[in-house]
Amino acid sequence: MSPAADWLEQLEARLEQQLEAFLRANPAQEALLQEQEQRDRTQRRRSQLQQAEGLRRELLQLANEIRQWRERAERARSAGATELAQRADQQVAELMERGRQRWHTLEQLGQQVQQVQAQAAANAPEPSRPPASDPLDQAWGRFELDQELEQLRRQQQQRP
């Protein structure tokens, strides 16, 4: 290991120790840090869900375009316009490749959502109900996010 990498690891370890000592000495700050981490996770999940919804809409649009170009290719073939039919078939192939790429991105995003959710479940104790100090808006926001995640999971499981 290089001296610079070793020094960096020592610095990171020292900073981590200082942070832990500070948080032990200031439990209110630790609570604020945990609250901020929860907000960050929630924001990440919202962002991922919005991105997934955008990809889903794009995939639906691509499916519609593919159907239209297939119909056009068939009409051109039946009318004897082979060159035009070939160009339409090429367009279908390009759209299908774009759809495969978007589908792959959506699958990766779904895996990321599951990882974030698993990390949140592993890091947070599971209370039977939200704490009394938890505002209703925050509890409702978590409920909506959980519902959206569940819907996304069902959609991914229903795909062919």
Image (tube, rainbow, N blue to C red):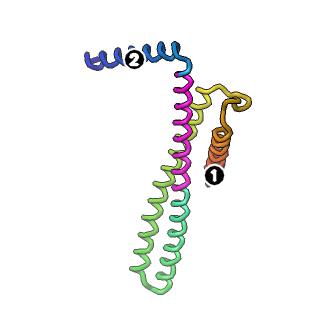
Q: Quadrant of the C terminus?
A: bottom right
Question: Which residue type does callout 1 highlight?
Answer: Gln
Q: How many residues crowd around disc 1 within 10 Å: few (fewer than 14), some, or many (20 or more)?
A: few
| Residue 105, above or below 129 | below
User: What segment carries the magenta color?
Assistant: 29-54
Report helix, strand or loop for mark 2: helix
Instruction: Please give the name of the residue rendered at 70% of the width and 28% of the height, measured from the top-left corner.
Output: 127
| Residue 48, above or below 25 | below
Instruction: Please give the name of the residue rendered at 53% of the width and 65% of the height, measured from the top-left corner.
Output: 61
Q: Determine which of the numbered discs, if any, sits on residue 139 in the image.
A: none
Relative depth, front residue between 77 and 2: 2
Percent coordinates x, y for residue 143 in the rendering: 67, 42
Q: Which residue is mark 1?
A: 155
Q: Which residue is mark 2?
A: 15
Looking at this rendering, what residue extends furthest in the left direction?
3
Percent coordinates x, y for residue 83 in the rendering: 39, 79
